[in-house]
Amino acid sequence: MSDSRQYVSESGMSHLLLPVYIFTFLMGVPANILAFYTFCHKEASDNMAWVLPFPLCPFTGFIFYGTIYNSTLLLTAVGVERYLGVAYPLRYALCRRPRNAVVACVLFWVVTSLNLSIVYIMPYAQWGNATAKPPSTCYMDFTESELKILLPVRLELFFVLFCIPFLICCFCYVNFILILSRLPNISRRRRLRAIGLALGTLVVFAVCFGPYNVSHVVGYARQESQEWRNVALLSSTLNACLDPFIFYFSSAAVRSMLKHCLKNVVAKLHILRCG
């Protein structure tokens, strides 16, 4: 029974995660390339001045923050999927459909887009208030009246897109670990790898998204925009390099696909060398 439970769990994960990863890759790569290009022109070399056409400011900001917060929902979805696959393997196998993963990804982008609409609205409001030319910075300097609108929205982002997903992740992975610890017919190595992956995901969640979202709470409490927010935001970008490791170790299908691709590359290099 435990072997079948483990098989169903890994099979369900393989069918669910692949569409999620494809969707994330197709959305994340262009967004990160755009953000990288933008920051090369915006960051320290220009003293945080916005030198690109101003309409690109809300667009790049919206895509950048949307990608970050969508990652919190995707990590939560992976945690929920792993918990359901172990806690209710048979029932979950009957309800598992790849299209559900695609629908979930679309819903995640809808939720993040609605909550991050302020990122698109505020720069245009600042531009409209400027008499002669657009603001010299992008989504950085705000008046007191603008902060009265912005700070409550940031607090909402903390609860809706960080706090609630993180609590769900904690619940799922804690129960995931407890269930695994009670299953008798799983090797010690596989159990430790799964537990390490669960704890590692929680650490990545907290380290990557915690500091920046905590700045929302501190800013709301002090009614000012914290100067260290940009430094805290750097930890969120680490998620882009840490997520692939989580995806690799969490899915047998992804590991198998990468190993197959690597073997093909090695085989082709061997043929070229012989030729």
Image (cartoon, rainbow, N blue to C red):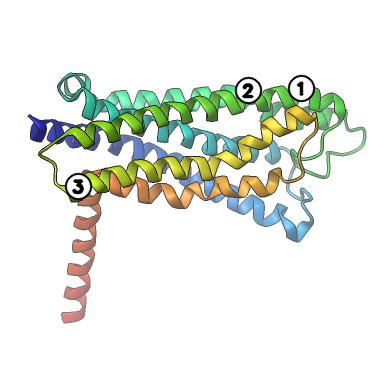
Residue that carries the numbered disc 2 in the rendered image: 156
Relative to 179, 213 lies left or right: right
Q: Which circle, 3 or 2, is nearer the viewer?
A: 3
The mark nearer the N terminus, 3 or 1, is 1
Per the model, the C-alpha gap separating discs 2 and 1 is 12 Å
Crowdedness of circle 1 by 10 Å Cα count: few (<14), some, many (20+)?
few
Q: Are marks 3 and 1 in contact (CB under 8 Å)?
A: no
How far from the left and from the top, in percent, is residue 68? Answer: 53, 39
The mark nearer the N terminus, 3 or 2, is 2
Q: Please state, as top left, top right, bottom left or bottom right, where the N terminus lies in the image.
A: top left
Q: Name which quarter of the figure residue 184 lies in.
A: top left
Q: Name which quarter of the figure residue 153 lies in.
A: top right
Q: Residue furthest bottom?
A: 274
Residue 102 versus residue 77: which sits nearer the camera?
A: 77
Residue that carries the numbered disc 3 in the rendered image: 190
Q: Please state, as top left, top right, bottom left or bottom right, where the C terminus lies in the image.
A: bottom left
Tell me the amino acid under the disc marked 1: Ile
Q: Which circle, 2 or 1, is nearer the viewer?
A: 2
Residue that carries the numbered disc 1 in the rendered image: 149
Q: Is residue 175 visible?
A: yes
How far from the left and from the top, in percent, is residue 154? Answer: 67, 28
